[in-house]
Image: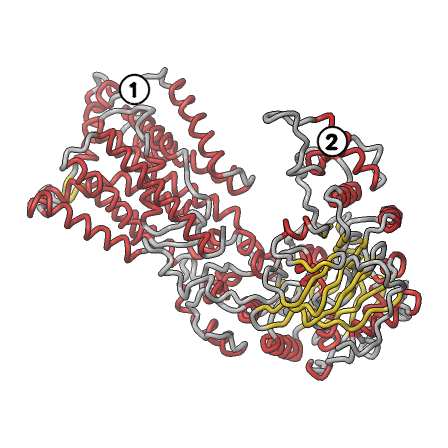
Amino acid sequence: MLTPPQSEAGRFTRTGKLTSILGTAGIYVIIILLLLVGLGIRQLDYLSLANLRSILQAVSLLGMCCAGLAFVVFSGNMNDMSLPMTMALSGMMAIQLIPYGIVVSVLGGIVAGTLVGVINGIMIGKFRAHPIIWTLAFNLVLSGLVRAAWGGSQIYPDTIAGQNETAQATAETFNLFARTYYFDGALPLMVVVMFIMFVLAQVIFSRTTFGNKLRIVGSQYEVARMSGINTERMVMTAFVLCSLCASVAGIFYASLTKIGAYSNGEGYDFRALTAVLLGGMTLAGGKGTMVGVFGGVLVLGMLTNIMTLIGVPTFNQYVVQGVVFLFIVWLNNYLEEKRGHA
Amino acid sequence: MNGDTSAAPATRTAPLALQMCRVSKRFPGTLAVDCVDFEVLPGEVHALVGENGAGKSTLMKMLAGLFGDYEGDILIQGDKQHLHTPTMAKQHGIGMVYQELSLARSISIYENLLVGRLPKKNALFIDKKKALIEAKALLEQVGLGKIDPRLDVAEISQCEAQLVEIAKVLGSEPSVIVMDEPTSALSSEEVKRLYDIIEQLKAKGIAIIFISHHLQEVFAVADRVTVMRDGKQVGTYNIKDIDTEFIVEKMVGKSIKDFYCTRHPVVTDDVMLEVNDLTRWGFFHHINFKLYRGEVLAICGLAGSGRTEIAMSIVGAAPQNGGVIKIKGEEKKINSVSDAIAEGVAYLTEDRKVVGLALTQDVRTNVLAPIIDNLASGPFYHPARHEAIVEQKIEALSIHPNDPERLVGSLSGGNQQKVLLAKWLATDADIMILDEPTRGVDVGAKQVIHDTILQYAEEGHSVILLSSDLPEVVGLASRVLILREGHLIGELGIDDISENAILLAMNGKGEHVAC
């Protein structure tokens, strides 16, 4: 068949930066706008250390999830819908293992959560299951398993520790994770962990073979395969990294609330994806940076913060978050279509 | 451009089924169809032939209403019509039978046949009984009277699906049916069945435009033939007055060989690649050939002959059911593309937009994609540090604009193809398999790519060229293997290579074919 030589110039902008209005630069413009709104409401109080800290601390769990989820989105697999149960599972496992010491507890939680990513990776990377359908179904399976395993009840670090004094001390340590601050309370440990994750993720994206291969896998799977890239392993690794980060977030969540429950990670699937997409990554994959994703996380955090300040009720906040999500997904599709990728 | 006298239609009394008067279609940079006069009589089978890129498909797409902005007039049954949309074309009695089947596989035959016009009982329900009767009647017209129209399309054979496709077109009562390579999916027995159906349609006074690369089919079924070349009409001939050699000569025309470099690299006796008995069931069987150092070996065959599949199996991107691949005399097991790259075999894929290039990434990312592991130090890899490689390739292939950070999707087709070639040259492979390396690129880029291929061979590497662009094969190849339905059926040495010889050999008519 004849394929007429058509000019493609114009269907793509020169570097693609312009098409992504909410690219790295754009998201920080929004942050400044939100800062101004905040200043308008609370005057200089808004920029107080306490408020900035509370914004950062509030987004740190979401940020950890996003640092991992970014790999999945970047690889062109859209979202990890099993994020909530990964968080719940790692938190509950860590609490359950408190009697065996803090090291076993934390490692156990991380291993349990990461295992979710290994299974996701095998199913999606090797057997090419649909990422959304598979992780959604697997999330349901996990929530059933978790409820069956713990008889549908919540668990608490101090009750699990029982009367044993060393175990009680371990429970204390566990609860302290989310309450550790550096520099006179200015810098929470959770925020430090989130920052470390973002820096590592950025290095992996830009300076490792894995990150650079993942970029090609994400932008065109078949091209990667025909370029000699082990596409299966790349996708598997992306899901494993995603679950690893979610497990850490899950442990902090359990430590913060002092509760291990199957509902621990609820809502993190969509909130994390919203932040990642706000940060300039695309559902099609292969685009975006961690600097941008961090901006996306901040915007979502500040939005929540401002809504709380002006007294928007929690349920109404969900509506706003949902609308932001729908908008960003629409924008994503719209820009892709404009770029001729429909 | 009508240098040859057109054959006069037998009778002029009835209005022409179709008349295209001085039609042209312009794409940015090219005139795909250049002032063509094309007419078809009622009840005539009119074959349309030409090499790839001659403008056949574009001409037919105009007729199908896919281009609103053609120049010239189209007359159907003597009335001037503007065919701006596919629906308009359909309404005016143009029926298109496409190469790729347009049936929905998971729904039933009758729903496919009557899509968009299922008879209704009332506002809510369709009249299934009536629909089945209508579908049955259509199927009978194509000799499928015994098939149950309630079956899903997925349940019938590919041949039957092709016939259902024709039945679907008949449903809109066309006066002209265009068949674009209708036999590409059919076995020779099934082709005969198609001929019978074409005879029946002819008897009903329906005009048929028949496009095929298989010239013997043209002689078997057509009444007249129009030859196209470079977007222009070469001439229209009565099939009785001509033979295969005549058509081939007209298709090829005065050779534009001068445009191609005719230098040929020195071929040595070193065997670089030896393929013994390579088989992939259903695609190709017992393929044997040797590739020498410094050689450009072309493998030619009609669409569906298995060229791409052979290349895919050699580089480990598709399975093989038997056979031995030796690289520089040593037997190698190649199970993946990365194995192939490690053994010094590169495969430049056809269709750069789907399997060739990541269009949303920049030139640098694309060029370095296959060699990330070679450039890495441990797990670490920093693309910007290897700018020299990219810049050297940009320079060597004069990729324009010469910016490694430019998105590949924003480049012209020719420059995209250069990036694809740069990507595989960067692997420093000794053996390069090039699948349609210049499809859809402009003349300038073609020249650069051809020069680069020859230079690569002259440097002591080897090239396997899979191309349906025959002038390109003649200009570059030092040896041509002829592939037909998955079997190598012949070989042309350097002195025998000409477009005519290759075309005849591919159609099973050549003197050099050693079956």
Using the image, name the chain to which the residue with label 1 belongs: A
Label 2 crowd (10 A; few <14 / some 14-19 / many >=20):
some
Using the image, name the chain to which the residue with label 2 belongs: B
Q: Nearer the viewer, residue B115 or B361?
A: B115
- The three-letter amino acid code for the residue at tag 2 is Leu
> Disc 2 designates what residue?
B151
Colouring rule applied to residues: secondary structure
Q: Residue furthest left?
A: A44
Q: Nearer the viewer, residue A65 or A309?
A: A309
**SS for callout 1:** loop
> Disc 1 designates what residue?
A154
Up/down of B128 relative to A153, above or below: below
In the rendering, at what x and y percent does residue B200 appear? 88, 47
- The three-letter amino acid code for the residue at tag 1 is Gln
In the rendering, at what x and y percent does residue B53 appear? 69, 67
Up/down of A8 relative to A132, above or below: below
